[in-house]
Amino acid sequence: MKFIPPGFWSLTMYSSETWYTVPNPINRYCLGSDNQLKTNADGSFTIYVQKDSPARTRSPTGCRRLRDRSTSTFELTRRRLLSSSL
């Protein structure tokens, strides 16, 4: 998704059982265009959705992981608001 100001996008993790955000020790429930996401060499970025932290070589610094420590199932919701100039 291309970010075009004043638009935005986000990816939020919800519990399939309670429909609330998934509790986690890093208190991160969504990632989006408001975050400082570390980009790959080609300008793209990777978002990890997993229980354990990715290896340091795969995810150096940068806020790009949603963490789920529970054994429950979850839903990912993508939102986007596009600029009215499109």
Image (spheres, rainbow, N blue to C red):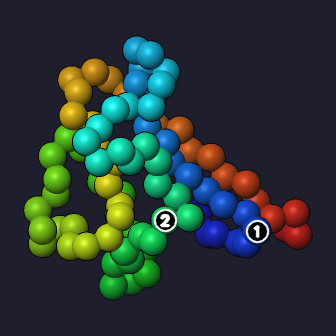
Asked whether residue 4 is in view, the answer is yes
Snapshot quadrant of residue 83: bottom right
As helix, strand or loop, the secondary structure at mark 1 comes to loop
Q: Where is residue 67 in the image (x, y as percent from the top left)?
A: 28, 44
Q: From the image, which quarter does the N terminus lie in?
A: bottom right
CA gap, disc 1 and disc 2:
15 Å
As helix, strand or loop, the secondary structure at mark 2 comes to loop
Callout 1–callout 2 Cβ contact below 8 Å: no
Q: Which numbered tag is attached to residue 35?
A: 2
* Kind of residue at badge 2: Asn
Residue sitting farthest toward the bottom: 41
Q: Where is residue 81 in the image (x, y as percent from the top left)?
A: 73, 54
Pointer 2: residues within 10 angstroms few (<14), some, or many (20+)?
few
At 52% from the left edge and 58% from the top edge, which residue is drawn? 32
Q: Relative to 27, say whether 45 is above or below.
A: below
Question: Which residue is identified by label 1?
Answer: 6
At 42% from the left edge and 70% from the top edge, which residue is drawn? 37
Q: Relative to 48, say whether 46 is above or below.
A: below
Q: From the image, which quarter does the C terminus lie in?
A: bottom right
Q: Position of residue 16 (x, y in %)?
A: 42, 20
